[in-house]
Amino acid sequence: MTRTFDAIIIGAGQAGPSLAGRLNGVGMSVALIERNLIGGTCVNTGCTPTKTLVASAHAARVARRAAEYGLTIGGPIAVDMKRVKARKDAVVGNSRAGLEAWLKGMANCAIYKGHAHFEAPNEIGVGDELLSASRIFINVGGRALVPNMPGLDDISCLTNESMLDLDVLPHHLVIIGGSYVGLEFAQMYRRFGSEVTVVEKGSRLIHREDEDVSAAVKDILEAEGIHIRLRAECISFARRGADTAVMVDCESGDPEVIGSHTLLAVGRRPNTDDLGLEKAGVEIDKRGFIVVDDELRTSVPGIWALGDCNGKGAFTHTAYNDFEVVAANLLDDDRRRVSDRLPAYALYVDPPLGRAGLTEAEARKSGRRILIGRRPMSEVARAVEKGETQGFIKIVVDADSNQILGASILGVGGDEVVHCILDIMYAKAPYTTLRRAMHIHPTVSEHVPAVLSELDLAL
């Protein structure tokens, strides 16, 4: 027997529950299907747990630097990983429980725990039940990519998910991948007390960023004792007793690194391979992402795809914005498009990197005449007062239109400060609007108008 709903949502990540709430609020009956944990990646294996661990690692770092601030702490700083993990688990558990309670309180929302698969364009099987709806929303997220690398099957390795289950301190953590996930884990575990080596195939870290940003992040990490191995073109693995040998073909350094634990952080893939999309006729691209238009509609009428599985973004905030786009178009008669949003994200090393819009390299490649403003954090009073002077502020402006094209703020508060620039960009106001603004002293934000007053034409 088939049970019919007004809408079916597959996946309870960042977009799914919010969409369920909007649809329920206008009187629609909703089936929400989740095969794992309510809250998806962000709550369970992404933002919430990792940023909780980052906070613990930051506390350990500040405690070790107590003398710099005129404080005396008796004895060496010890990190209890079981308590660190317990704190993380409590924060995650509370967040997930709150979301579950909200969903269960909806009048016409049925929650199904199990694996969803298409039987037809408007029919979904879950367990022994068959559900149907004229509107189906796919919000299945993604998972860590585990590539086919020599020797990988012979060792025990970790991903960003299994890493969160550790309640012991690795003696030597070797991280494969020098991008956002890998670098956050690298710094936090170094601060917890592990020896850490990052192995990156490319010639620099976080290759999508400008070279000066990559170099500055590398300096920050190396200053804390993290080993960085670049140009590792031929990575392979082998057992060495209880440890793992990671073979690297680098220009310098030992040809192999021996680690007690190995973390793979080389990318992610969408959870679309076992949904039966072919039965519904939903088109996917060669990487497995669901093909969508500017309003997140798939190739099949009545089916939408939101979040990481559509290839339009890989962040919690892009997934939530996907919900806003779909809800506005479907319920509010307010046409919104994915192409209207600006790139924005952060790298949560400490100090963090806040990013908005184009990089300097992307702006140059576009052929525009550009103005660039820079200021080292060592000249920012708030950073000096806090004893956190690493990094810099960089803002890129179109010399002809006076529009801000992008910004990179690597430094204390950079993940927050970047939003004042992002808001001006959304308002499509000229940079002079922000240049003339009076900001509060002493803050990092007060230097944004100053940087915009010192723009130079890029040659």
Image: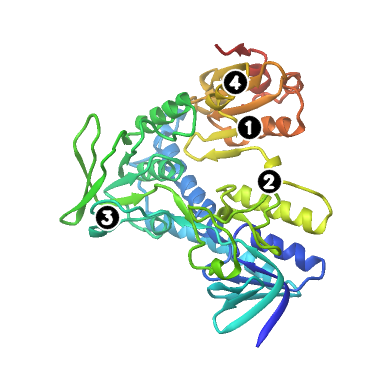
Q: Amino acid at mark 2?
A: Val
Which residue corresponds to the image point at 72% horizontal and 55% vertical from the top-left? Answer: 326
Q: CA distance from mark 1 to mark 2?
A: 24 Å
Q: Residue 220: percent from the left, percent from the top? A: 41, 30
* Front in this rendered view, residue 59 or 350: 350
Disc 3: CA contacts within 10 A as few (<14), some (14-19) or many (>=20): some
Check whether the beta carbons of the residues at disc 3 and disc 4 lie within 8 A of each other. no
Sequence-first disc among 1 and 4: 4
Residue designated by label 2? 338
Q: Residues within 10 Å of mark 4 (few under 14, many from 20)?
A: few
Where disc 3 sits, the SS reads helix
Q: Which mark is residue 417?
A: 1
Q: Which residue is mark 4?
A: 367
Q: Position of residue 256 (x, y in %)?
A: 20, 41
Residue 31, placed above or below residue 397: below
* Residue type at tag 1: Val
- Judge left or right: residue 78 versus residue 53: left
